[in-house]
Image (cartoon, rainbow, N blue to C red):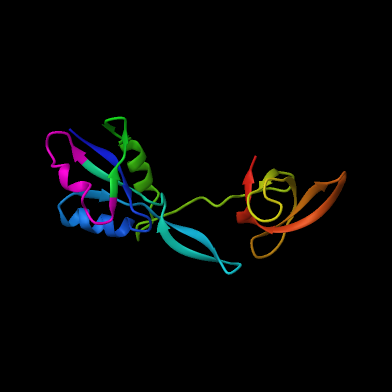
Amino acid sequence: MKYWYLIQAKPRRENLAKENLERQGYTVYLPIARIRRQRRGKVHSAFGPMFPMYLFIFLGEGIDDWGPIRSTTGVSKLVKFGQIPARAPGTLIDALKAREDASGIQVLPEKMYQVGDRVRISEGPFEGYEAVIFAKSARERTVLLLKVIENYIKLELDSHHLESL
């Protein structure tokens, strides 16, 4: 019987690990998603691993040769809990594959906030503060009411700097 297992790759070497494992005949899955990265104060959209430093491999106990995995270029280790390799539920892999578009990119749901929702600021100088959504503005910006010293101030932030409470 074969199962999906979790592999830890070296930092920013997930694709290299995937290519080298596939070259050895293993079935590997690396979910890719559109992610936002901030560089020099600007937010850019890029494609990258949905789970940085991790990928999945389909192996059978007693069937496949597990030895070459840890010495494969790009691979750090097979993730284990104690001495037992970490199994990923097959339903998780199926659900991830079902959310892919035609080009194999994960379609992630956008965070949809409504006026009046309570949120927490996740980045910037107000990180950790709780606020209430006051209005929506253009360019993915959200106007918040933030309580500071018993007064409310209006603050405009990018929506991706918020998380639900």
Could you tell me which residue is drawn at 37 percent across and 46 percent down? 96
Quarter of the picture holding the N terminus: top left
In which quadrant of the rendered view does residue 65 lie?
top left
Could you tell me which residue is drawn at 70 percent across and 43 percent down? 117
In which quadrant of the rendered view does residue 159 lie?
bottom right
| Front-lying residue, 45 or 20 | 20
Position of 32 with respect to 122 (left or right) is: left
Q: Is residue 137 above or below residue 126?
A: below
Could you tell me which residue is drawn at 17 percent across and 34 percent down? 61
Spot occupied by residue 102 in the image (x, y as percentages of width and height): 35, 59
Position of 81 with respect to 122 (left or right) is: left
Spot occupied by residue 76 in the image (x, y as percentages of width and height): 30, 49
Spot occupied by residue 97 in the image (x, y as percentages of width and height): 34, 48
Spot occupied by residue 34 in the image (x, y as percentages of width and height): 46, 59
In which quadrant of the rendered view does residue 74 lie?
bottom left
Could you tell me which residue is drawn at 20 percent across and 40 percent down? 59
Position of 101 with respect to 127 (left or right) is: left
Q: Main secondary structure of the magenta part?
A: loop
| Front-lying residue, 21 or 89 | 21
| Front-lying residue, 151 or 144 | 151
Q: Is residue 80 above or below residue 124?
A: above
Disc tally is 0
Q: Is residue 70 magenta?
A: yes
Quarter of the picture holding the C terminus: top right
Residue bounds of the magenta highlight: 59-75
Q: Is residue 72 magenta?
A: yes
